[in-house]
Amino acid sequence: MFKVSFKGKFAGEVDLDQELNLLGAAAKGALPLTHRCGGHARCGTCILTVESGAESLSPVGAAEARVLKILKAKEGQRLGCQAWTHGDVACRVD
Ligand code: FES
């Protein structure tokens, strides 16, 4: 069992017992992480900042990297729909 926590625009914690992306974790907790493209790494609206637990996330893939570059993402920012976690993660949504 591990935990994903969100703060910023909304706040909440979600307990997970299997790998899930951060967008899915937010949805599981009924937290309103925006996802206009439906989780297909096209819109960038699910962007968030990982404050801890980055080592528990899947690596940035090509599609995510392309969107993060377009968005001029800062260090630690990920797309919630593309970052899969298998451990505790804390993130902020601005
Ligand atoms: S939901 Fe569109 S990029 Fe993540």
Image: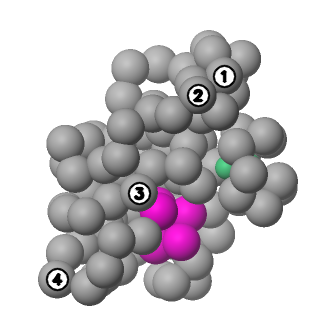
Local secondary structure at mark 1? helix
Mark 3: C-beta under 8 Å from nearest atom of ligand 1 = no
> Label 2 neighbourhood size at 10 Å, few (<14), some (14-19), many (20+)?
few
Local secondary structure at mark 2? helix
What's the amino acid at mark 3?
A: Trp
Q: Which residue is mark 4?
A: 1
In 3D space, how far apart are the residues under numbered discs 1 and 2 (Cα atoms)? 6 Å
The disc label shown at residue 88, or none: none
Q: Which part of the image, by quadrant, shows the C terminus?
A: top right
Could you say where residue 53 lies in the image, as x and y percent from the top left? 20, 48
Q: Which residue is mark 2?
A: 62
Predominant SS of the magenta segment = helix
| Residue 71 falls inside the magenta stretch | no
Does the residue at mark 4 contact the one at mark 2 (Cβ under 8 Å)?
A: no
Could you tell which of marks 1 and 3 lies nearer the N-terminus?
Answer: 1
The disc label shown at residue 84, or none: 3
Does the residue at mark 2 contact the one at mark 3 (Cβ under 8 Å)?
A: no
Which quadrant of the structure image shows residue 55? top left
